[in-house]
Image (spheres, rainbow, N blue to C red):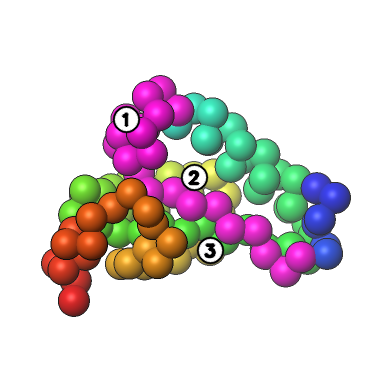
């Protein structure tokens, strides 16, 4: 929270919920820890001038997670959620996976 009010926003990436999240990030049973961290960020920045925005890169592996992501972020109190169809910084995804969108 030392950056609260100093930076304009903090971005939290969320590409799935529960087991889908763990599979996408390659870390079994990791969603609980992620949730605690995301909620902690929201709490720490609540009432400051630093906005929290959630970001999700949508691909065929998590297309069915869009609605659960929306519901979860809203349940946590998040008010900004952005969806992207291409992750320019990904080093683990096959580029052919994105041909679905372009």
Q: Is residue 9 magenta?
A: yes
Is residue 36 placed above or below 7 in the rendered structure?
above
Q: Is residue 17 visible?
A: no
For label 1, the SS is helix
Point out which mark residue 74 bears: none
Counting from the top left corner in percent of width and height, residue 55 is at 47, 59
Q: What residue is shown at x 52% (from left), y 35% (from top)? A: 34
Which image quarter: residue 43? top right
Q: Which residue is mark 1?
A: 19
Above or below for 34 versus 82: above
Labels 1 and 3: the sequence-earlier one:
1
Magenta residues span 7-30
Question: Which residue corresponds to mark 2?
Answer: 75
Q: Earlier in the sequence, mark 2 or mark 3?
A: 2
Left or right? Give the position of 7 relative to 22. right
- Disc 2 residue crowd, few under 14, some 14–19, many 20+, Cα 10 Å: few
In the shown orientation, is residue 33 left or right of residue 94? right
Q: CA distance from mark 1 to mark 3?
A: 23 Å
């Amino acid at each position: 929270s030392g950056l609260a009010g100093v930076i304009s926003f903090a971005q939290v990436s969320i590409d799935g919920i529960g087991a889908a999240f763990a599979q996408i990030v390659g870390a079994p049973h990791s969603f609980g820890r992620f949730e605690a961290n995301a909620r902690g960020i929201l709490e720490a920045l609540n009432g400051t001038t630093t906005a929290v925005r959630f970001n999700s890169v949508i691909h065929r592996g998590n297309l069915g997670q869009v609605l659960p992501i929306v519901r979860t972020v809203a349940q946590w109190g998040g008010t900004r959620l952005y969806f992207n169809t291409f992750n320019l910084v990904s080093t683990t995804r096959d580029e052919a996976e994105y041909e679905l969108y372009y």
